[in-house]
Structures are given as C-alpha cells and as structure tokens.
Image (tube, coloured by chain):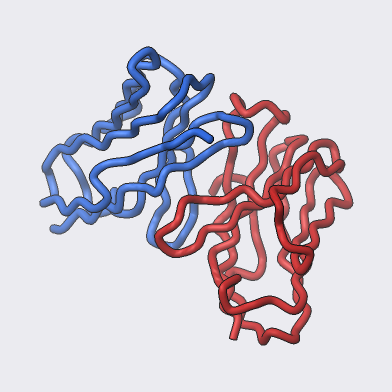
Chain colours: A red, B blue
Amino acid sequence: ETGVTQTPRHLVMGMTNKKSLKCEQHLGHNAMYWYKQSAKKPLELMFVYNFKEQTENNSVPSRFSPECPNSSHLFLHLHTLQPEDSALYLCASSRDLDYQETQYFGPGTRLLVL
Amino acid sequence: GIQVEQSPPDLILQEGANSTLRCNFSDSVNNLQWFHQNPWGQLINLFYIPSGTKQNGRLSATTVATERYSLLYISSSQTTDSGVYFCAVEYTPLVFGKGTRLSVIA
C-alpha cells in the first residue's frame, strides 16, 4: 500500500461512452499526477496539479479531461476515446511540485476501449 | 529531449541469483529514481538516488551522475521480485525509461 488508491481497477468502454477515473491520496500531499502507460512504451506524463491548480498538460487530447476538486482527489474524465487509448492509467502524488520529491503511485486503472 | 535507456530489456533469473540493471541518460539531471512495477501494475518507488550509493535490504543502487548512468543491484532474487523495473530522471517533468522486465523463476 502506497497511500494512493485508484478506482476502478479495470474498465472496458466503448468509443461513445463517458467514464471517469478516480484517484485519492491519503498522504497529505499537494501535487498529483496522471500518467499513461501503453504496452512497450515508457510512462507518459499527462497532467500535473499543484494545490488543485493544473500546472502541466503534456499535449493530451481533449477527450481526456482532468479535474482536481481538492488536494486529495483527482479525476480523469474520459469521452469519445479511441482504441489506441487502451492503456494502464496511473495516478501519483508527491509532497510538493518538486521533481526531486518522491512520487507515490496508485495501483492503476487498466482501460480497454472497444 | 533527454534520452533514458535501460538494459537489458528482458531478464530471466533463477531464484537466488544476483542481477544488475542499468540506466543510461543522455544529459545532466538533478534527480534519478528507480521504480518497481509489480505484475498487477502498481508502481513502487525503490530509490531516490541522484548520486552515490544506497542500500535497502537485498536491493542497492548506485548513480554516477558525471558519467550519466545508474545501476540497480538485486541480490538473492526472489519470485516476488518479478515485474518491470523503471528508472526515471528529472528533466521537467520526470522522464521514464522503457523498463527492464524481470522474471524470477523458482
């Protein structure tokens, strides 16, 4: 247990569906992150939030929409996804937005888009 | 951008064997971390090691920042060590290598 939880753990959705991924951290951290891990590719950083404010958006398509209502919760809203969006989506948190801080990862949501 | 290369890409070990995983990076960095992703996908931070050597049980890591590489040593491997090992460097933001997939067989 790393103190970061993600739900659901598995998700299958059609290209016309709308779904949301949820991340919650119990570590009192101020920074939260969404990563995408596709097969045989390095982890890709998608979004970064610091004190609920988005600080980075690494050229992520608009069909992915993040939301951070407070420092403990992070959502990733999904709509009209493509099959190539199938991947493991990992949430992480760190004490501060300093990349020297250790990032703690959740177990991930394995997403399959049909 | 910075390149992070890990080797070997795949490794199969007999239980009890030792191994060394390598991470090379193409530019100066302030931070390097090693992660273990277990077969269920969860990513666990192992070491934050921008330079020097650290040890944690059967695992140890060494980073030689001036020569732009880091090594992860696993001694007396166990089946629970199986998974993918990533190194990640701080280059605003963290940049991950492709990982080394380790399988430890009994």
Against A66, residue B75 (above or below) is above
Horizontal side, residue A56 vs residue A53: left or right: left
Horizontal side, residue B30 vs residue A82: left or right: left
Horizontal side, residue A91 vs residue B49: left or right: right
Residue at 65% x, 83% y is A13
Q: Residue B15, position in %: x, y?
A: 13, 50
Comparing B63 with A104, the one in front is B63
Comparing A60 with A53, the one in front is A60
**Most distant residue in the front direction:** B1
Residue at 84% x, 51% y is A68
How many marks can you see?
Answer: 0
Quadrant of res B65: top left
Against A54, residue A69 (above or below) is below
Residue at 73% x, 62% y is A61
Quadrant of res B38: bottom left
Residue at 66% x, 66% y is A7
Q: Residue B74, position in %: x, y?
A: 24, 36
Q: Residue A31, position in %: x, y?
A: 74, 37
Q: Quadrant of the C terminus of chain B?
A: bottom left
Q: Residue B80, position in %: x, y?
A: 29, 52
Against B10, residue B87 (above or below) is above
